[in-house]
Image: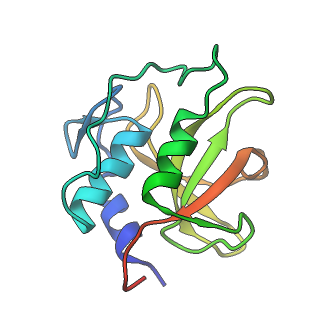
Amino acid sequence: MTSPVVDSARAWIGTPYMHQASTKGAGCDCLGLVRGIWRDLIGPEPETMPVYSRDWDEVAKSEVLWRASLRHMRPKDIQAAAPGDVVLFRMRSGCVAKHLGIQSDVTDTPKFIHAYGGYAVTESPLSRPWQRRIVARFAFPLKDI
């Protein structure tokens, strides 16, 4: 079973990685993918996106991406995986959470869709190393999912 979020995310597969971009087929980063899905399913973005660096405020240890996710999406129990969830990753212990993906499959071989440097938007296995990095899980504020 899929969800409108997964269907929207899959339409972005193959979009080249481009830091701070959010244009299907032309370029996006992980946040740009989530922003594009928001526009596809909800409408205009809820706030103007400031310029952001690839380090996501690691020096200041400020959870910028996490706080923004809390402002606009519904937090979920981290263990309550469902297709279409937005998953937030901490790439290294002690660093801020700075990568997002869309959970696309919750079977015995879970998957997620994401954009990251050097690659186009792709659907990847949500392997144990990726699962260990999940620090938060959110749902888009859609009434029908």
Q: Position of residue 126 (x, y in %)?
A: 65, 55
The image quarter containing residue 79 is: bottom right
The residue located at (68%, 67%) in the rendering is: 109
Foreground: 101 or 47? Answer: 47
Relative to 91, say whether 139 is above or below.
Answer: below
Foreground: 136 or 47? Answer: 47
The residue located at (58%, 54%) in the rendering is: 87
Relative to 60, say whether 82 is above or below.
Answer: below
Q: Position of residue 74 (x, y in %)?
A: 52, 66
Q: Quadrant of the C terminus?
A: bottom left
The image quarter containing residue 136 is: bottom right
Name the outermost residue toward the top.
59
Foreground: 91 or 122? Answer: 91
The count of marks equals 0
Relative to 85, say whether 49 is above or below.
Answer: above
Q: Position of residue 56 (x, y in %)?
A: 53, 25
In the image, 111: left or right of 95?
Answer: left
Describe the colour scheme in one phrase.
Answer: rainbow
The residue located at (72%, 26%) in the rendering is: 95
Relative to 28, say whether 124 is above or below.
Answer: below
The residue located at (55%, 19%) in the rendering is: 55
Foreground: 63 or 116? Answer: 63
